[in-house]
Image: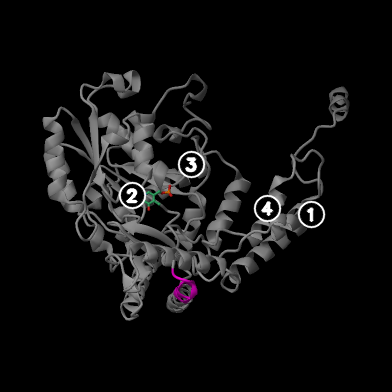
Amino acid sequence: MRVQQRAADAFTEETLDPGNWREALALSRQIVEDAVAYLRDVRDRPVWRQMSPEVRACFLTPLPRAPQPLADIYGTITETVMQYPMGNIHPRFWSWYMGTSNFTGALGEFLAAIQGSNVGGGDHAAALMDQQVVNWCKEMIGFPDSASGTLVSGGSMANLICLTVARNEKSGVDVREHGLGALRKPLRFYGSDQIHGCHRKAMEALGLGNCALRRIPTDRELRIDIGALRSAIAEDRAAGFQPACIIASAGTVNTGAIDDLVATGALAAEEDLWLHVDGCIGALLAIAPENAYRVAGIERAHSVALDPHKWLHAPFEAGCALVRDASAHRKTFSATHEYLATTARGLASAPWLHEYGLQTSRGFKALKIWMSLKEHGIEKFGRLIDQNIAQARYLAELIEAEPVLELAAPTNINIVCFRYRRHDFDRAALKSVNSEIMLRLQEEGIAALSDTTVHSEHCLRVAINNHRTRRGDLELLLKAVVRLGDDIVRGSRALPQA
Ligand SMILES: *Cc1c(COP(=O)(O)O)cnc(C)c1O
């Protein structure tokens, strides 16, 4: 025994653990203190700032070979990374569509990394919490207990997971074993012309190709035209295709339009198709007392993709795929590996959670969601959703009252499409003025919004998925838009006419 002990001491084994835990603790306290101040004062900083060449150069330094004190590294981070965020935690960030994160969620991320579990499977607390959060997501949208689900990186992955199950279930052959070559007829999927871009990528990755996703025209409210959908399905059957799946959008990314989930569900049932709901924006309306009615019928879909990093404000990333038929879900992704056998007792005695998706190793995403849901309760999250929708309505009213602004699409939930308008400007001139307004708002750090084209009309787009936005922020935005628009127009008129 003594001999062995001496032999072990002869090795100088290394570790990544801190050399001095007291110093590590002191620096950690400093980091937490700074983090609290950073969030507390977010409103006082610009939404976004251009990085200087010097700052950019910090990200071109060579691969570090020698060690460096952690305190110095943290110093660099505070001056670079923390000073130049994307801006989406700011109260006046309304670009594209994303959530605003939250402090408790950030603590959850930290603790999840400290605890460090891999949620690919195994019998441990993180795995149980992962399933509990999936169960809560099911409950939020009214899915049955028997449904299954998995937490993934975001909505794009959640949609891909669900569409893979739909493809396999509706192909009529063993696609997993034999591939698409075994299909008797080419499959067809259907979505509106407002469908999110991730579905195209999914169709391509699934080997079906972009053309297999038919884009169906939308009505004035930007919802899928049910009559046109019905005709497209009939046309495809007659032409020898196999209609497989309707992808209904519960909240489109352009305008927040919600396809008629009851009608698409009825049509899917009539035609024996899979109904998938892309609920990345709108599935969680189901928890908002004033707006839940908009997604009535979502609970009858075969699968739903939703995004906790949007209206639950989980720090990136967190998406969730839900599948009504748990066995169809598992059948799509289960695989037995000799190195991942289940045992009767011990660490490997629980179901393998990697059998519900594409990843093997999985991060502990559940903790950040779990902690903030526990802290605030689901009713508050529902009220915050209602609050964003009421704010969007308020913004739309302000726009309607302002002569140089006009709405460019109906405001349905929390997305407002509008533009600065001069009656003597043609479409191209309006597009360039509005694009310039958008860029100056960003460059001046006032607000971040994005632009889009709806039914061929270019417009600015404000997506309020933000628990920090106040009405005053929206008033400030419109004042700035009018000021910048007027400046730009004045500038262009001062130029000699070409
Ligand atoms: C955000 C969004 C997605 C993609 O989700 P990510 O989390 O960004 O991957 C898909 N569909 C809709 C309608 C979305 O709003």
Question: Quick one: label 3 or label 1, which is nearer the N terminus?
Answer: 1
Q: Residue 127's mark?
A: 3
Quadrant of the image occupied by residue 76: bottom right
Magenta includes 125?
no
Q: CA distance from mark 4 to mark 2?
A: 43 Å
Q: Which residue is mark 1?
A: 72
The amino acid marked with disc number 4 is: Arg
Give the amino acid type for the residue marked by disc 1 in the picture.
Asp
Q: Quadrant of residue 146?
A: top left
Q: Amino acid at mark 3?
A: Ala
Q: SS of the residue at dot 3?
A: helix
Q: Measuring from the top left, give residue 390's x and y in whole percent.
A: 34, 72
Disc 3 from disc 1: Cα separation = 36 Å
Span of residues in magenta:
489-497
Query: Where, quadrant-wise, is the N terminus in this rendering?
Result: top right
**Which quadrant of the figure contains the C terminus?**
bottom left
- Which mark lies nearer to you, 4 or 2? 4
Residue for badge 4: 56
